[in-house]
Image (spheres, rainbow, N blue to C red):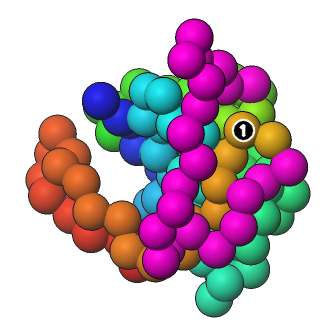
Amino acid sequence: MGTNYYVYYDRCSTCGRGEKELHIGKSSVGWVFSLHVIPEKDLNNLDDWKKFLYGKQIHNEYGDKIEFYELIDKITKRNHPKGLNRHNHNHCIGHGEGTWDLIEGEFSWWNTKQHMKVI
């Protein structure tokens, strides 16, 4: 079982709501966090994501609001009684310095609102 995380960005100057949504990554039981690398948006590592995410509206695929520091903990302070698995496929472009891997390319999943793909 896993949970995808998103951020709203490009806030509306009138209402403050984010106009666009971007996939941050996925948390799956027994695995390190899959941090979505998006080079065309200069999101190449966790430090880039921290700068981008700070002060923005973060939520999971179920619509629950996630605080910035809560998400950073989900990425960097993961554990499992049997240890964590690392990704070993073509989309994994590197292992983070902690409990995350850098995943580039397409993520597919079922969202409660709709089936969608983010590139």
For the record, the magenta segment spans 77-97
Question: What SS does tag 1 mark?
Answer: loop
Q: Amino acid at mark 1?
A: Thr
Residue 28 point in image, percent of width and height: 43, 35
Is 18 drawn above or below residue 67 in the view shown?
below
Residue 7 appears in the picture as rendered? no
Is 55 drawn above or below residue 62 in the view shown?
below
Whether residue 92 appears in magenta in the rendering, the answer is: yes
The residue shown at (73%, 58%) is 95
Q: Residue furthest top?
A: 81
The residue shown at (74%, 80%) is 42
Looking at the rendered structure, the number of numbered marks drawn on it comes to 1
Residue 99 appears in the picture as rendered? yes
Q: Please indicate whether residue 93 sits to the left or right of residue 95 in the image.
A: left
Q: Please indicate whether residue 105 sits to the left or right of residue 16 in the image.
A: left
Residue 70 point in image, percent of width and height: 68, 24
Q: For mark 1, what is the residue? A: 99
Quadrant location of residue 78?
A: top right
Is 68 drawn above or below residue 37 in the view shown?
above
The residue shown at (71%, 67%) is 94
Q: Nearer the viewer, residue 2 or 111?
A: 2
* Secondary structure, magenta segment, majority class: loop
Q: Residues within 10 Å of mark 1 (few under 14, many from 20)?
A: many
Q: Residue furthest left?
A: 114
The residue shown at (47%, 77%) is 90
Instruction: Give the quarter of the figure containing the C terminus.
Output: bottom left
Whether residue 82 appears in magenta in the rendering, the answer is: yes
